Image (cartoon, grey):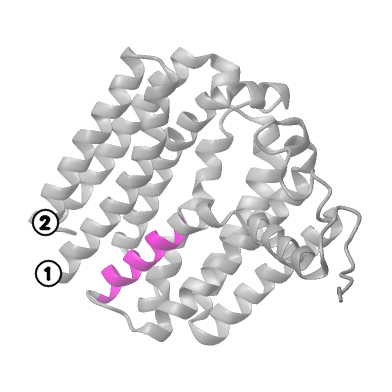
Amino acid sequence: MSVAVRVDSQGLAPSARLGRTLRDYVALTKPRVVLLLEVTTVFAMVMAARGWPGWRLTIDTVVGGWLAAGGAHAINCWFDRDIDASMGRTRTRPIPAGRIDPANALVFGVVLGSLSFALLALEVNVLAASLALAGLLFYVLVYTMWLKRSSVQNIVVGGAAGAIPPLVGWAAVQGRLTLTALFLFAVIFYWTPPHFWALSLLIRRDYASASIPMLPVVVGEAETRRQILLYSVVLVLVTFLPMMVNLFGPVYAIGAGTLDAAFLATTAIAVVSPTARTARRVFYYSMVYLALLFAVMAVDRVVG
């Protein structure tokens, strides 16, 4: 005796189709990107509290931040569906592949953003909610809808959106922003160009085919590598500022100095040895660098 199982046009049973749809909606939120943002949020909370801020506050803040970032990315996927369809790296994403209707993706993003503001405002505080909303709006309106398609400075200015999560974490704990919180913002702001320009070196042809004015497309690979090194130097100088005003102590000085030296070496090698391999090293090490730098800052604040 056999049991008939209804399948769709692609040969998927209802349960499999539901699972794929759920995975596609999660993919719209770009969870791997959001993960690094949430790492900076949690470490910022630990710094602000000079210890563990408590599970409930941490979970509420992380979930609220995740909803905001995920909503921003979903709206980005909706708006950039034409670009994604023309790039080999992104044409299999849910919208250009036809698995999710664009209108549904837009509604999904707006709902996530609304839930984020409501959760943070009700369970954390209005400042944290407002900052998360500001980050979403900046990413969608300024970066996605304006700068990405029109300016070679898209990543430089647009990086401000990615620098907001630690502000949300700090505000969640203290209910205000301080000089240390603004320093955390500055670190991510100056970290963003080297990180994303390294990625753009690896997928320059995709950006060129989609007419996106990323730095390698506009000024070439050699100048892009020099700009990566230049911004890395600026980032390192920024990381030294807290020691001048006693925001952090010796743990930070040693840890940041070690991470900075490795970052400069990695970006310098990418200049003198202009290969895909060295660009890839900058891209991946920059993520390790940011996570470890925030970890070092958190440890310094707790034990200092």
On screen, residue 2 above or below 247: below
For residue 177, which quarter of the picture?
Answer: bottom left
CB of mark 1 within 8 Å of CB of mark 2? yes
Which quarter shows the C terminus?
A: bottom left
SS for callout 2? helix
- Rendered view: 21 above or below 223: below
Residue 271, above or below 115: above
Q: Which residue is mark 2?
A: 251
Image: magenta residue range: 37-49
Q: Is residue 149 left or right of residue 102?
A: left
**Residue named by callout 1:** 303
Residue at 47% over, 75% down? 61
Percent position (x, y) of residue 9?
A: 91, 54
Q: Is residue 38 magenta?
A: yes
Q: Residue drawn 29% across and 28% down? A: 266
Q: CA distance from mark 1 to mark 2?
A: 9 Å
The residue sitting at the front extreme is 1
In the picture provided, is 265 more to the left or to the right than 39? left
Q: Residue at x 39, y 19 (%)?
A: 226
* Residues packed near mark 2 inside 10 Å, few (<14), some (14 to 19) or many (20 plus): some
| Residue type, label 2 | Val
Res 298 quadrant in image: bottom left
